[in-house]
Amino acid sequence: MQTSIATVSLSGGLAEKLEAIAAAGFRGVEIFENDLLSFDGTPKDVGKRIAELGLRTVALQPFRDFEGMPEPQRGRAFDRAERKFDVMQELGTDMLLVCSNVSPVSLGGIDRAAADFHELGERAAKRGLRVGFEALAWGRHINDYRDAWEVVRRADHKAIGLVLDTFHTFARKTDLKPLRSIPPDKIFLVQVADAPWLDMDVLSWSRHFRCFPGQGDMPIVDFVEAVQATNYSGPLSLEIFNDQFRAGSTRNFAIDGLRSLVYLMDQLREKTGQAAPGLPAMPPRSRCLGMEFIEFAADEQSSAGLAHLFGALGFRNAGKHKSKQVTRWTQGGINLVINSEKEGFAHSHYITHGTSVCALGLKVDNAAATLDRARKLHDTPFRQPVGPGELEIPAVRGLGGSLIYFVDPTSELKAVWEVEFDAVAAQAKNADAGLTAIDHVSQSMRYEEMLSWLLFYTSLLDVTKTPQLDITDPGGIVVSQVIQNADYSLRIALNGSQSERTLSSRFLSDYFGSGVQHIAFATGDIFATAAKLKANGVEILPIPENYYDDLEARFGLPADLLKRLQAGNILYDKDETGEYLQVYTQSFENLFFFEIVERRGYKGFGAANAPIRLAAQSRQARHPAIPRL
Ligand code: MG
Ligand code: MG
């Protein structure tokens, strides 16, 4: 696989983009003409920089409105092409990408277009150059790769070939079968972009919603499989137009791009059972068996506050680290860790974010293999010195500089609690509140980061993503999407907000970055748990009476159930999968909070209740005098 990316895919100036593309490890680059025009230097300077960075310029693009023009536009189109050929020679690329004509004055006819391309081929060949023809989904006469291929076939010139683009193909739901029989030497370039399925005009869809393979809904693997069937061996080039990417970090998005191509080839290998050229050997997506622990970074004072809250939530102090200021809290199958060390990773996380979740510990089938796969996917491994008697737990960087640890049941890592912790004598106070497991973890992030973390999780772990939901916050819309594994032992909700005024955004500014905003624990009996929490003095988020009137109208619940829900500030939802009952604690230091859920078969996350909860929290946030735990 030759990896390539079009400069239009990234934010920043051309020099910055090229550096990020090279640093990520791409081999090729398509130069988008606008990037060249806004560059302070000649095309020759750009070509020199590209060569210094060890990159190859795959193509100059796009050249518009060429084929099928009547005179005098036809003559002018050829003159324009000659000038582009000059630029290409300075730049040091041999290919010009021509996209199908959208001009209202252009004329149809495959033969007319083929004749134009034959002549362009003659002119290009004289200079040792080539021209690739791409069907835009909104082209005036040519909007289907099959017609573009027919033009190229009839042009019958060695300097004229076809450019395939996944987006244009899937946007029109074009059949992939004819693609398989195109001769590989006539395919000059394959461009890949994914997108969510949206019902909107194709041009806007393409300009704003393209994303890296695996981030959208299109079956890109099927496309690449059809391309592979032709024996094409040229570049796979990412060509993404996306407002989120333009707002993001150039370097990180370049790495995301490469990760998406590695993952795409990995999926292709899995699908075909054949080696994918250029792809390193890597373990399959890791099977996640659940969340082994959640680690909080704290200082001395806030660790006492957290310990108090955990106790009130029914957790038991089950261990103290042998050499560090780290304690373990357990209930049911849940492990929480409070780390108040004065140096090391957790401490720096505390300095940056305040009291916060600094690490998630995932239970996987093979921790070493998971780390190996993470490396191949260009994720960022993390190591810090381990003290005597401590285990080295494999880890990678996660959201907002946090860590994701991998532990497994087969290696020595399974004994981490026994190896690193001393047991603490049983405590009588605050008995178990019936919490059994971590139901889900909710991470808040900038909207621009959502696609990155979606790709991070789905490429590394054997998880699927749910459709995106828009949730109404009093301050704007929050977009929410969940990644989860087959048995639901891992569910992580990713929430991104574009408005500065949503609770999710305020979390980001109060917290100085992205991170875990809430953790939901499962219970088998929410009424019993709620009663226990109340007795233990846990402050619960109050839910307005109107909500319960509406519940009655929507679901026709029995009066006594309604009364119990209202008395406990418990939210309720029901769909075809079952019932969902949820209750929220008030926030800890205005940063994060806990949720208790009882699932009666229900598979969702109570999206219908989210606006109620957000409005309630927003009211609390405006009244900071309300005592906190
Ligand atoms: Mg394209
Ligand atoms: Mg939740």
Image (cartoon, rainbow, N blue to C red):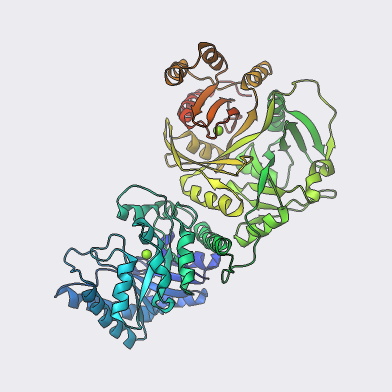
Q: Position of residue 533 (x, y in %)?
A: 66, 20
Q: Position of residue 342 (x, y in %)?
A: 73, 42
Q: Name which residue lies at 71% across and 52% down.
A: 367
Q: Quadrant of residue 285?
A: bottom right
Q: Is residue 109 left or right of residue 271?
A: left
Q: Is residue 372 left or right of residue 627?
A: right
Q: Position of residue 162 (x, y in %)?
A: 36, 73
Vertically, is 339 above or below 240? above
Q: Name which residue lies at 47% across and 15% down.
A: 545
Q: Quadrant of residue 490?
A: top right
Vertically, is 536 above or below 7? above
Front one among 624 and 123 = 123
Vertically, is 438 above or below 111? above
Q: Is residue 526 left or right of residue 300?
A: left
Q: How many marks?
A: 0
Q: Residue furthest bottom?
A: 126
- Is residue 16 in sight in this rendering? no
Vertically, is 420 above or below 267? above
Quadrant containing ligand 1? bottom left
Location of the C terminus (image quadrant):
top right
- Is residue 546 in sight in this rendering? yes
Q: Position of residue 397 (x, y in %)?
A: 63, 51
Q: Is residue 76 left or right of residue 269?
A: left
